[in-house]
Image (cartoon, helix red, strand yellow):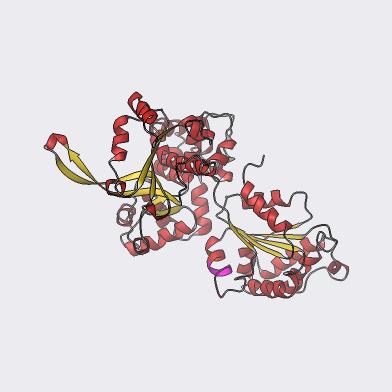
Amino acid sequence: MFIGREAELQFLEDKYQSPGGQLVVLYGRRRVGKTETLRRFCRNKRHVFFSCRECTDKLQLAAFSEKMMREDIPARQYRSEFADWEQAFRSAAELPGGANGRGKSLLVIDEFPYMCKGNAGIPSILQNVWDEHLKDAEVMIILCGSAMSFIEKELLAEKNPLYGRATGIYKMKPMGFYDAAQFFPGYSDTDKVLAYAVLGGIPHYLRQFNPKLSLADNIKKNILTRGCVLYSEPEFLLRQELRETPLYNALIAAVALGGTKLNEISQKSLVEDTAKASVYLKNLNELGIVEREFSIDAGTKEKANAHRGFYRLADNFFRFWYAFVFTHYSELESGDVDGVYQYAVAPELHKFASLAFEDVCREYVRVLQKIGALPFRFSNMGRWFGKTTIRNADAGGKTTVEETELDLVAVSPGFKDYLVGECKFKGTPFSYGEYLDVTAKLAPQQEKAAFYYALFSRSGFDGKLTEEAVANPRLALYSLAEIVGGTRNGKS
C-alpha cells in the first residue's frame, strides 16, 4: 500500500504535463521514500527507470546502454552499446512516449551522484546535451539522489554545469504525522502519537512495524531484538554516509540524552574541541539527523553565531534508538528484550514522546491555518526561548529571572499578532495554573501586540481552565482527538 506523498506526485505530474523539456532534480535523505514515489509516478507511463550503482564509469555506461536498448529506439538498430555518455543522454528524446506523440519521453536516473562519482564530467556532458538537443524536446529527465550535500553544493550550486538548467527542484522530507499515522489505522490516538515519536516520518521505518501488533510488541520485536532491520539501522546509515562513526555516535547520543547547546554537547560527548564538534554537527544537520533550532524572534546575527542556537535530533527514530538501544546495547545483545522494555522504555515512553507531540501540534496549527480557523494568518512559527521574571510571593514579592521557553509561537508579519501555544502529553489534565504560567511569558511583547493562546492536551483540561476558555475568546483548547483527527471540531 502506497501512503501519502500527494504533493510530490502532483509536482511531478505538473512537470510531466508542461510543454517542452523538463529536467527535474528530486533529492532527500536515505530511506525517505524517493524511489517508491518515483515508481508510483511512473506507473502507467512509458518510461525507463535506471538505478545507478557504485561502479566504474565503463560498467555504468554499459548498464545504462543495456537498459536503454531494451526500448524501441533507433540507436539499437545499429549498435548494442553507446560509445559515450553524450550519445547515451541524447537517446532520451527517442524513448517511446514523446517522439510518437503519446506523451513525454520519461527517463528516471536514480542515485545520480553514483554516476557522477564514476565520471566527474557527467554534469557537463548532460548540460551540453540538454542545451543543444533536449530542452525543447518533449522529454522529462528526473535526476534523483540521496547525497544531499553533493546535490546542493556541487550539482545545483552557482558556477556548476547544471546550475539554472533544472526546471524543477524538489527536496523530499520525512512524512508528517498525519501521513505517518495512516500506517496504523487501528491504533488509539495516543498510540498513533507514540508510534510517530518512536519512528518519525521515514516510510522505511514505518513499514517495519506490523499494524496488527501492539505498540509494545512492535518496539520489542522490530527495534530491540537482534537481527531485525531497525536494531542496527542508525549505525548502518552512518557507516554509509560518514567516516569516524564512533565520534558521530558520541555526538548523537549526547543530543539524544538532552544536550542542546554546543558546549554541553561537546562535554557530554567528550569531543572537547567545540569547533570540531560544530563541524560534525553541521554534517549531521545536512543528513537530516540533527537540526539547529533558534528562538522564533532570533535575528540574523544570532543565527550566524556558531555557538548560539539549540540542537535537537530531527529524526525521531534516531532519538529513540540512541536513548534506548545505544544506552542498553549490552543487555539487548544478551537478549534481554523484555527487561529493557519493561524497565527502561515503558516508564519513559510518554515523557519521551512529549517533544514529538509538540511537532504534531505545530502540524495541526498549519492545518488550522489552511482551513481559516485561526484568529490571524501567521508568517512564521516555532519555539520561543528567553527569560521570564518570576515574582515569588513566599519570599516577600522578590523577583527572579529564569530561563524559559514556549512550545509553540506563531507570529504575523511584523510581530503584530502572537499565537502562543503549550503542549502537554501527560496523564493528567492541563491545569489553570499551568495556563497562567504560559501567560506570564513574553510579558513585554503583550503591551505591543495582540495575543491569543492555544493549549493542546493529551488528557483534557481542568474545570477552571475549561470555564476560562468559554469566557475568553482569545483562548482555545484542543483535545487529543481533535489534534489527531486533523480538523477542528470545537469553537471557531
Direction from residue 436 to residue 155 in the image, left or right? right
**Residue 143 appears anywhere in the view:** yes
Task: Tell me the residue at 84%/70% (across/down).
Answer: 79
Classify residue 344 by image quadrant.
Answer: top left
Report x, y in % for residue 367: 52, 42
Q: Is residue 328 above or below residue 306?
A: above
Magenta stretch in the rendered image: 153-159
**Residue 428 appears anywhere in the view:** no
Report x, y in % for residue 295: 36, 52
Q: Nearer the viewer, residue 283 or 59?
A: 283
Q: Nearer the viewer, residue 293 or 124?
A: 293
Report x, y in % for residue 36: 66, 49
Question: Extreme left residue here?
Answer: 396
Q: Is residue 153 above or below residue 16?
A: below
Report x, y in % for residue 407: 38, 43
Task: Tell me the residue at 55%/51% (across/down).
Answer: 173
Direction from residue 21 to residue 361 in the image, left or right? left
Q: Is residue 98 above or below residue 483?
A: below
Direction from residue 107 to residue 382 in the image, left or right? left
Q: Is residue 154 magenta?
A: yes
Q: Is residue 281 above or below residue 314?
A: below
Question: Extreme top residue here?
Answer: 463
